Image: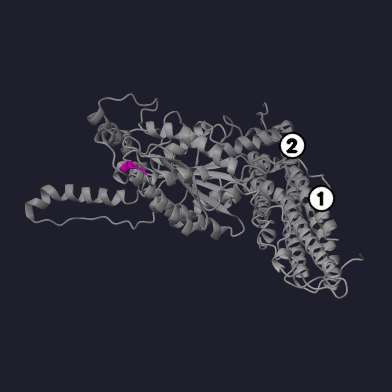
């Protein structure tokens, strides 16, 4: 389930290659227009980055849980000798 | 009558004679051209803005789905694992995802709202222009003709009324558009990555000494819990994979060697840089030695120290000092860099900023605050202070260093260069040589340098991204600096061929004709004027001279980097670094 969550957070590949279509002047020459054009360009990219960063952390957590479980299983298996 | 062309304006192609009459009338009455305001509003591309935020909506969906799946995992972990650690960690990840999604959705909603308002405003502008055209067309042609030059000096009251109404309505629509944009700008100040980046970097792990509930019956916990906690983590450095090298590892190694150097000059500079690195680390948590070149008896060397981590910064500012600075003594520059960074963090806690104190050019009079140099080098350095030659050469080096900094910084990081005094001339020269900057700030500038007549001279930096802070009390920003430098230069080094503008430091960038944005800020040093009282005839002869000298000295106290990076001017500089242009107060140039 945690692996599936990481997969969902990575997205559907529709934003693999993208850059802001907004130029400095796209929203007019006012200071507010220029500020929004720059900030919008950055924040949308960061939204995708946020999802991917979380995907990476979730994947690491899944890996650690799996590794821990495997080690417990191995440890327990060592306590119970198999048939000779 | 022919219709004046409205080149480059969206609505320009269909402008009628009626609207052109109003444009002429406004011009004759000294009023702003109403059609310019209309064109500015019609040029706003709200559709592209809305389309771009569709990408953010998709990211919000991913965050939501991921969080939803994590929610399903939490009870499963609780049921299967005796330790609360795994479920607590997954819960923290889920909550961070939801928080990030809240930011993204909030920004996308704000963008939708702004786009909706802007689209309505544009439709209203079109409507107003249409209604105005119709109203003018309905007037008696004699009344319309009366508005033009050479006819009756006063336009008909009806026509005047139409102009007044149109101007007022466009003002109102512009205010609505600005309000929508400003509101969106505020919403965009939050960084959607923050909730995720603020999670602890060291995963707590799944073990903590207690095993999974699905352990085989009769099983025991492993004898070494640490073996459980240290599962394979792809990013964690291991002996086989030491992880990425620090970006300044080579410079630190050179610094280490220089600290053992037998050359006094080399060693003194290295000691000074080490002290500044320590100071920068105390101020910024992370300090990086981005540039390091050894000093010797002919050269003061080069150094640049970043206060804050450039490799993760949203904004990177490079601060360039003026004359009498030297890499061996960067304390003031590091202090100013730390102050600017702190102000940027105060204004925008969600963003990370690194400020680089760049002592990377051959700074004139550097020996005054630097290391021992030979006497000939001192003479050379003194003459260097009298023109912009070193700033011009330094501009080439600065542009190259900024390219290197960009390779170390995140892809979308904003880059700003701020220069004080001759440092501002250096920044201007770098911009003129194609430095890849988002913004430049010229503080206490003696001039923009040779070959930079206007702010349009920067190939990659639009004029309105060049900001100038020049205190009226600062004598260095006045023309007399150029006169004094010319006079001193002629006395010391003979006649010099100055640039085509005839000024040793180039054009004053605070002039209105230069075309930069002049920041509305005042000096942070109290204005004091002294009048000396001397006895009898001495007062008559020496008093005015003494008073002038003292007042000149007081005037010079306004010219310091720290003064420019204090108070409102520091706030404005930090707002530029953040790209928060609405927070930068501007005024007409000189």
Task: Determine if the magenta segment contains residue B581.
Answer: no
Number of callouts: 2
Whether discs 1 and 2 lie on one chain: the answer is no
Which chain contains the residue that carries disc 2?
A: B
| Residue at the farthest front position | A84
Q: Which residue is mark 2?
A: B137
Numbered circle sitting on residue A11: 1
- Secondary structure found at label 1: loop
Residue B30 visible from this viewpoint: no
- Secondary structure found at label 2: helix
Q: Nearer the viewer, mark 1 or mark 2?
A: 1
Residue A49 visible from this viewpoint: yes
Q: Find the magenta span and give its range.
A: B261-265
Q: Position of residue B464 (x, y in %)?
A: 55, 40
Left or right: where B143 falls relative to B569:
right
Q: CA distance from mark 1 to mark 2?
A: 57 Å
Q: Position of residue B423 (x, y in %)?
A: 41, 41
Q: Position of residue B151 (x, y in %)?
A: 59, 31
Q: Position of residue B85 (x, y in %)?
A: 74, 70
Height in image: B113 above or below B263? below
Q: Estimate how packed mark 1 is, as few (under 14), some (14 to 19) or many (20 or more) residues with alpha carbons within 10 Å.
A: many
- The quadrant of the rendering that contains the C terminus of chain B is top left
Q: Main secondary structure of the magenta part?
A: loop
Numbered circle sitting on residue B232: none
């Amino acid at each position: 389930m945690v692996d599936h969550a990481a997969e969902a957070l990575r997205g559907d590949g529709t934003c693999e290659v993208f850059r802001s279509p907004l130029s400095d002047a796209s929203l007019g020459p006012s200071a507010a227009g220029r500020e929004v054009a720059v900030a919008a360009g950055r924040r949308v990219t960061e939204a995708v980055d946020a999802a991917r960063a979380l995907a990476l952390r979730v994947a690491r957590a899944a890996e650690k849980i799996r590794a821990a479980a495997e080690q417990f299983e191995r440890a327990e298996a060592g306590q119970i000798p198999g048939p000779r | 009558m022919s219709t004046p062309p409205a080149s480059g304006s969206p609505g320009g192609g269909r402008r009628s004679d009626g609207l052109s009459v109003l444009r002429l009338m406004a011009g004759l009455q000294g009023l702003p051209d109403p059609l310019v305001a209309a064109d500015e509003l019609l040029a706003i591309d709200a559709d592209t803005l809305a389309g771009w935020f569709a990408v953010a909506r998709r990211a919000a969906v991913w965050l939501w789905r991921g969080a939803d799946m994590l929610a399903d995992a939490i009870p499963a972990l609780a049921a299967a694992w005796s330790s609360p650690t795994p479920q607590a960690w997954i819960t923290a990840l889920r909550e961070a995802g939801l928080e990030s999604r809240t930011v993204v959705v909030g920004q996308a909603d704000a963008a939708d709202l702004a786009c909706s308002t802007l689209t309505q405003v544009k439709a209203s502008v079109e409507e107003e222009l249409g209604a105005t055209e119709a109203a003018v067309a309905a007037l008696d042609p004699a009344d319309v003709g009366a508005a033009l030059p050479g006819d009756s000096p006063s336009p008909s009251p009806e026509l005047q009324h139409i102009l007044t109404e149109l101007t007022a309505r466009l003002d109102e629509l512009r205010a609505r558009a600005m309000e929508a944009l400003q509101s969106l700008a505020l919403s965009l100040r939050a960084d959607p990555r923050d909730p995720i980046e603020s999670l602890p970097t060291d995963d707590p792990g799944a073990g903590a000494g207690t095993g999974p509930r699905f352990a085989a019956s009769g099983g025991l916990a492993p004898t070494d819990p640490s073996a459980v906690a240290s599962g394979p983590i792809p990013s964690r450095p291991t002996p086989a994979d030491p992880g990425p090298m620090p970006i300044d590892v080579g410079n630190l190694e050179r610094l280490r060697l220089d600290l053992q150097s037998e050359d006094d000059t080399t060693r003194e500079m290295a000691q000074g840089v080490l002290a500044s690195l320590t100071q920068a680390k105390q101020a910024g948590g992370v300090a990086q030695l981005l540039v390091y070149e050894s000093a010797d008896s002919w050269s003061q060397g080069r150094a640049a120290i970043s206060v804050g981590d450039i490799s993760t910064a949203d904004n990177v500012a490079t601060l360039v000092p003026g004359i009498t600075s030297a890499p061996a003594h960067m304390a003031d520059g590091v202090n100013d860099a730390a102050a600017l960074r702190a102000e940027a963090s105060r204004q925008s806690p969600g963003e990370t900023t690194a400020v680089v104190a760049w002592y990377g050019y051959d700074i004139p009079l550097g020996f005054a605050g630097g290391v021992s140099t030979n006497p000939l080098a001192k003479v050379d350095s003194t003459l260097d202070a009298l023109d912009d030659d070193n700033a011009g050469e330094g501009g080439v080096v600065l542009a190259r260093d900024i390219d290197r900094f960009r390779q170390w910084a995140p892809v979308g990081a904003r880059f700003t260069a701020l220069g004080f005094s001759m440092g501002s001339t250096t920044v201007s020269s770098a911009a003129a040589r194609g430095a890849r900057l988002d913004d430049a700030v010229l503080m206490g500038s003696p001039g923009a340098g040779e070959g930079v007549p206007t702010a349009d001279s920067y190939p990659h930096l639009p004029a309105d991204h060049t900001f100038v802070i020049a205190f009226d009390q600062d004598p260095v920003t006045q023309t007399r600096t150029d006169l004094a430098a010319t006079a001193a230069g002629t006395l010391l080094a003979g006649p010099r061929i100055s640039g085509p503008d005839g000024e040793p430091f180039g054009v004053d960038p605070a002039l209105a004709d230069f075309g930069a944005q002049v920041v509305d800020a005042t000096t942070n040093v109290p204005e004091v004027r002294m009048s000396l009282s001397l006895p009898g005839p001495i007062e008559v002869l020496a008093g005015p001279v003494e008073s002038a000298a003292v007042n000149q000295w007081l005037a010079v106290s306004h010219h310091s980097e720290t003064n420019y990076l204090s108070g409102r001017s520091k706030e404005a500089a930090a707002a530029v670094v953040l790209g928060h242009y609405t927070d930068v107060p501007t005024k007409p140039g000189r």
